[in-house]
Amino acid sequence: MKRRLRLGMVGGGQGAFIGAVHRIAARIDDRFELVAAALSSDPQRAHASADEIGVARSYASWDEMARAEAARDDGIDAVSIVTPNHLHAPVATAFLNAGIHVICDKPLAMTLEEGEALAQLARDKKRLFALTHTYSGYPMARHARELVEAGEIGEVRVVQVEYAQDWLAKPIELAGDNRQAAWRTDPKQAGRAGCLGDIGTHAYHLAAFATGMLPIEIAAELHTFVAGRQVDDHIQAMLRYENGARGMLWASQVASGAENALRLRVHGTKAGIAFDQENPNELLFTPLGGATQRLTRGRVDSAVARDATRVPPGHPEGYLEAFAQLYKDAARQIEAIDAGVPVPPESRLLTTVDDGVAGLRFIDAVFESHATLVYSRVKNG
Ligand SMILES: NC(=O)c1ccc[n+]([C@@H]2O[C@H](COP(=O)([O-])OP(=O)(O)OC[C@H]3O[C@@H](n4cnc5c(N)ncnc54)[C@H](O)[C@@H]3O)[C@@H](O)[C@H]2O)c1
């Protein structure tokens, strides 16, 4: 009988956001079982959180958990890291050193140096390091990539990606009752990149995922709209690609009226495609000079979309299933690595530590460009 992989979790205690999403995602395909956790930096809260959701082994701290789990015959196979950003690198390092596979949320680390060291460590230890860029788990985002790869839109010319939210339009971090806002606007916990690291990296990743291309040059501006905020809350960038394509990326957490508006358009020499994360069961495909086709999940002839689909056409799937797809891919890779066999090709779209390093390089390039960016005056009238 196949056994479920034993999963541990660091972060994700009472009142946390993404930890619960990871727990749901890990269960959807029955490949994981949560058996151990250090759910909070406060030991009492960690144990109370673990009691509430029935985790067998609750630890007061993540370093104790890494040591204890590595020493057990039935220790965890993988750990999910769902803490604020500043802990990703130290926690991942401890678990990789303990020989445990890592599934970490984004952004990968506080600095590029930290990120590159993690990538090297994962290679040295021969452990999986998955990074949860959620939006690459959608069937239609995967189909978009497949269409570009197959040349269906021709040579890519224009890449337009945006990620707009409005939940930080006011200085809610000052109220003291929104912990997600508090750490995201504190450079010591979030890193020097605010909106850029939080959702700019998601937009950057989705564009790279769908097109198969990373830009070679960037011109970018960071901006902070909310007075007194210590990190950016809006960024805009222009992208240049090796094949001559041009792109634009903007991300904002102060765009009033925007909920979770991650949108991607890619135009090639033969056709254009458009994906909207708030309507993820479809992908628009428009051939040059032709009518727009609404490609729907469950009906497109696509192996990658089918693999990421769980319910029949017309039943909506969404964010949780996209997240679950990353866990499914991670399970397939962990099982293969542990069995000493090649990872199955159908899991190849899993986002990893290398995507995290690319995101950190993007952050550095944006800061470098922002420091020297020159705007030209418009000679009106
Ligand atoms: N992939 C996505 O779409 C997505 C979405 C939201 C957040 N995230 C990422 O997930 C991470 C967490 O974000 P969130 O919004 O859930 O934050 P959160 O503040 O809601 O949760 C963080 C959790 O980490 C715990 N924690 C802090 N220090 C700890 C320690 N020393 N030991 C154990 N636990 C500790 C906190 O107690 C809390 O439970 C961030 O890196 C964020 O960028 C990713």
Image (cartoon, rainbow, N blue to C red):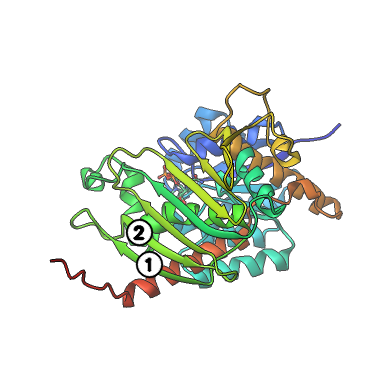
Q: Residue at x 61, y 22 (%)?
A: 314
Residue 199 x, y percent position in the rendering = 43, 51
Contact, mark 1 vs mark 2 (Cβ under 8 Å): yes
Please, what secondary structure does the residue beneath circle 1 have? strand
Determine crowd level at label 2: few under 14, some 14-19, many 20+ residues with C-alpha closer than 10 A. Answer: many
- Viewer-nearest residue: 212 or 124: 212
Residue 291 x, y percent position in the rendering = 57, 37
Residue 73 seen in the current view: no
**Looking at the rendered structure, which numbered label has been put on residue 282?**
none
**In the picture, which quadrant includes the C terminus?**
bottom left
Task: Inspect the image, locate mark 2, and give the three-letter code of the amino acid beneath it.
Answer: Ile
Whether 362 is drawn above or below 257: the answer is below
Determine crowd level at label 1: few under 14, some 14-19, many 20+ residues with C-alpha closer than 10 A. Answer: many
Task: Inspect the image, locate mark 1, and give the three-letter code of the amino acid beneath it.
Answer: Ala
Q: Distance between the Cα atoms at labels 1 and 2?
A: 7 Å
Task: From the image, tell me which residue sits under label 2.
Answer: 235
Residue 172: quadrant of the picture: top left
Return the residue found at the far left.
Answer: 381
Please, what secondary structure does the residue beneath circle 2 have? strand
